[in-house]
Image (spheres, rainbow, N blue to C red):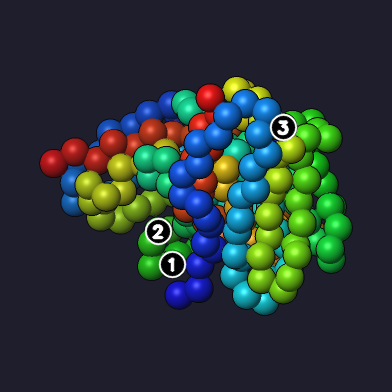
Amino acid sequence: DAKTTQPTSMDCAEGRAANLPCNHSTISGNEYVYWYRQIHSQGPQYIIHGLKNNETNEMASLIITEDRKSSTLILPHATLRDTAVYYCIVRVGEYGNKLVFGAGTILRVKS
Amino acid sequence: EPEVTQTPSHQVTQMGQEVILRCVPISNHLYFYWYRQILGQKVEFLVSFYNNEISEKSEIFDDQFSVERPDGSNFTLKIRSTKLEDSAMYFCASLLLAGKTQYFGPGTRLLVL
């Protein structure tokens, strides 16, 4: 699985959009970009995933660059409850492959 | 919304004792996983299970570890003789189909004394 690079931490004001970047310059054509988050010591929570098109769901939007070497997770209106560690993971979509977690980005939402 | 459940939420055991961590994956899911997270460290993959057999395991998953799906609903992780370094949060996850999304349980916090 391709490696990802994320900033160690970010701050965001409550009510503003949080934009979390991820670099995955060695991503292969059959690898998807997944985002999970972990609030305190809870189980990782799925947020969104995509292959090459931008995706949006009720939680977030995922913007993937045309060359697929980087992506941005957008939380449109961050709340204090969005304070968490956010993980960007790339993996082959087929098969039941494991998730390989990095250190992620600590997002602190402040009032 | 269906969710993965795990029991117990906390377990304290003495070094050398056997522990069994239990998980109830989302019904009709086909792939099952165990991950662990030592305090302050990354989430690490332990093992994946599909079609009643281990499909992949990490270096951490040595002979002291085993997994089982004893019936149609439970998925267990057994540590035969616990060590101090087994103290961690253990997360179970399940997946409906390849290419879809893994869903995680809330975890079991294991403390080995």
Answer yes or no: are tags 3 and 2 on the same subunit. Answer: no
Pointer 3: what residue? B81
> From this viewpoint, which residue is outermost toward the left?
A111
B29, A100: nearer the viewer: B29
Instruction: Using the numbered discs, state the Cα–Cα distance from disc 2 to disc 1 in whole angstroms.
Output: 6 Å
Tell whether label 1 touches label 2 (CB within 8 Å). Answer: yes
Q: At numbered mark 2, what does the secondary structure look like: helix, strand or loop? A: loop
Question: Looking at numbered disc 1 in the image, what kind of residue is underneath it?
Answer: Asn
Which of labels 3 and 2 is toward the front?
Answer: 3
Question: Dot 2, crowdedness within 10 Å: few (<14), some or many (≥20)?
Answer: some
Pointer 1: what residue? A57
Chain of the residue that carries numbered disc 1 in the rendered image: A
* B108 lies above or below A96: above
Residue at the location (30% across, 56% down)? A76
* A45 lies above or below B37: below
* B61 lies above or below A44: above
Question: Looking at numbered disc 3 in the image, what kind of residue is underneath it?
Answer: Ser
A36, B9: nearer the viewer: B9
- Residue A49: tell me if it is visible: no
Instruction: Using the numbered discs, state the Cα–Cα distance from disc 3 to disc 2 in whole angstroms.
Output: 43 Å
Image coordinates of residue B103 in percent, x first then y, are: 56, 60
**Which disc is residue B35 wearing?**
none
Apparent side of residue A100 relative to residue B41 in the rendered image (left or right): right
